[in-house]
Image (cartoon, rainbow, N blue to C red):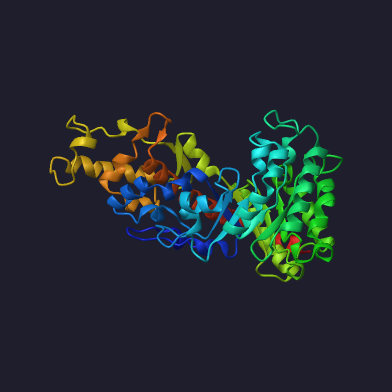
Amino acid sequence: MNDDNWNVSVNNRPDYRHLREDNASVLPAIQSMFMNHSGNRDVNSKLIKLGYRAFGSFNCLCDDGLFFYDAALYSAGGAELDIEKSKIQTPGIWDRRNDTTLMTDSGGFQVMEGRWTPKEYYEKREQILAWQEEIGDIAIAMDVPSGSVNNRNAKCIETFDEALNWSKRNFEWQVKNRHPEKSRMLNVVQGLTTDGHNGVMRWYDEVKGFCDRDKWGDNAFDGWSFGGFAARNTPTLLRVISRMLQDGLLGKDRNHRWIHVLGATAFERVATFTLLQRALRQVLGDDKFTVSCDSSNASITISKGTYYTDTPNKISTRQLLNANWFQPTCGKDCRTHCTESNPLCRPCLEKREKDMTAMFGTSTLNFHMSLDHIFELVNFDKSKGRPSPLGYLSYMFISMEMFLRHSYRRSAEVVAKKTGVVAQLVH
């Protein structure tokens, strides 16, 4: 991958869409709190005053974004499922470009975390399905994760069979009631081990019938996703995919052209998924077959008081800025006394700009922030212990862009060293 792909210049709006063309697709998991700001009038007014195109400047999925990307994951777990309310509350997810692909997770993680019981999850099925089909392009079926077993947070799940049977009940309802012209839907493979009663192979055998077009016609599921142990363990994942090929459950003839791995975007694994995608495209004769993965890393880091940025050789995390970062030589508080027109402030500002470049790396936002915007980054909502809305949006923007760049760049370095691996996988 040429280094020119990573150059960022002042006033440039970089386009990262090309990175998905011959690589596994990395889908940043967008948090509902992030999208909620798109419908907040006060936040949008402040952004406009600072020279941005409101929330859209921070949304890589829309025409106004300061950088462009074309794929993401959005979960029903934290979203407003009432479609009309959602359009008002989170317009940013509805106003995305036509070239974007939005994958919707069904909210199984909420069951594993104990926020919903399996029964409550099932009772939301109509609302979840309608929301998935209306808002997204690809949907994850309503699984109850096997990780719920022995999880003290999960409610009403004690055995592997319970998780599997609730999942099958959800899948059957979705297969019967979905509208395939609205959204592709991916079957889900879970498991606690590779083989045995609690194994991934057993789960696969129990649910593969929902991809059977001879039985379900166009309503059959359109592809596959892997969660839990099945997603974490690469040898097991490859073994299941081999079975899928033997069972005729992959390929464009049956419209099973997508594999998604939930919650796995370490760059070494992105490299593995890229090699796998290239091999499957050869085996299936389908240059559009896609392997994807998602991660909430860029979002979670903000909640921990850090953000992602880049250094000359790697991505790193830094602490969110606070008022102590501003240490003026004049002894006055920069936030109330500093102006760009004041000649006494100029030397201090020049140092600040250099420090800021080091703090925020080569993020596109670094080249669009005014002094007033920089001061906003140290304002915290004391009642909630987190950055102000503008600070949150800014750190999220930087983290997401840096994480995407890091994932693709480092995975490309690994792939370049794995010459011959695709041929081995094919044969």
x 66%, y 70%: residue: 287
Q: Position of residue 352 (x, y in %)?
A: 27, 41
Instruction: Name the image quarter holding residue 163.
Output: top right
**Residue 168 seen:** yes
x 27%, y 48%: residue: 370
x 49%, y 34%: residue: 304
Instruction: Name the image quarter holding residue 274.
Output: bottom right
Which residue ends up furthest to the left in the rendered image?
343
In front: 407, or 168?
168
**Residue 191 seen:** no
In front: 24, or 256?
256
Q: Is residue 128 above or below residue 283?
A: above
> With 173 as the anchor, is 355 left or right in this view?
left
Instruction: Name the image quarter holding residue 178.
Output: bottom right
Which residue ends up furthest to the right in the rendered image?
196
Q: Quadrant of the C terminus?
A: bottom right
Q: Position of residue 307 (x, y in %)?
A: 45, 40
Q: Position of residue 285 (x, y in %)?
A: 72, 71
